[in-house]
Amino acid sequence: MPLRIGVLALQGAFREHIQKLSVLGAAAVEVRRADQLSKLDGLIIPGGESTTMGLVAERWGLVNPLRRWVSQGRPVWGTCAGLILLADRATGQKRDGQTLLGGLDVSVNRNFFGSQRDSFEGDLQVAGWNSPSPAVFIRAPAVVETGPGVEILAEWTDPDGRTVQVAVRQGHILGTAFHPELSRDLRWHRLFLQMVESVTST
């Protein structure tokens, strides 16, 4: 049976994730209710506006079920805003802060790469990959601090010479500051499916 992967469909680029997963043979479903989580093998939290996504998740009663999902060691991948939501710590938040699911031992700067006008594309050198990965950064965050159990998969050095982490993994949690679903590279989605398989096969 194909892996059943949910994509949190509160806002943002969830359809593009579903398209990529379908190409790779997974059964991808849009997730909007807490009762859908129990039927999944893995979960993707897509890009969007992290504060809005947090508010909608609270309104729809999803925050605690999502936190349980992460704390129980279920496979989860956050892209852009999804990375922010999975972080244990976030800076650059609005005055009242925002909802964080936590679980990923990193500090994230919400708008490290600036505003929508500062969006850009570039090639990333990814640990263990033979060729660069094209990455689309849209008002992107960055990981500015990692805990001891976090594996750094890719870094980016900005024009000012500041190097930050833009792809990390901690056990069952994958986080990317960019939007793999908007490029033609399927390797990030393939990596996540491999992570899910390793959990479901144990």
Image (cartoon, rainbow, N blue to C red):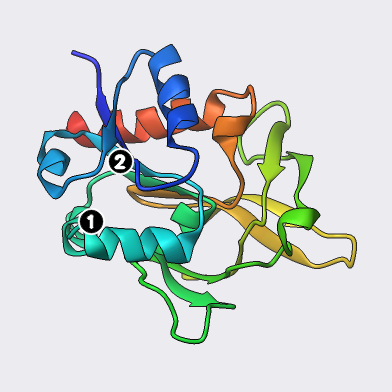
Left-right relation of 16 to 127: left
Percent across and percent down for residue 44 are 37, 41
Task: Specify whether residue 150 is in view.
Answer: no
Task: Specify whether residue 189 is in view.
Answer: yes
In front of the other: 152 or 57: 57
Percent across and percent down for residue 181 are 55, 32
Percent across and percent down for residue 103 are 33, 64
* Element marked by disc 1: helix
In front of the other: 136 or 89: 136
Percent across and percent down for residue 178 are 61, 46
* Element marked by disc 2: strand
What amino acid is found at the position of numbered circle 1 in the picture? Leu
In front of the other: 52 or 155: 52
Report the number of discs: 2
Q: Residues within 10 Å of mark 2 (few under 14, many from 20)?
A: many
**Do the numbered discs 1 and 2 sit on residues whose CB atoms are within 8 Å?**
yes
Left-right relation of 195 to 150: left
The residue labelled by disc 2 is 43
The residue labelled by disc 1 is 66
Classify 124 as above or below 157: above
Q: Residue at x 39, y 58 (%)?
A: 53
Q: Residues within 10 Å of mark 1 (few under 14, many from 20)?
A: many
Disc 1 and disc 2: Cα gap in Å? 10 Å
Q: Residue at x 33, y 46 (%)?
A: 76
Q: Which mark is residue 186?
A: none
What amino acid is found at the position of numbered circle 2 in the picture? Leu
Q: Residue at x 25, y 56 (%)?
A: 70
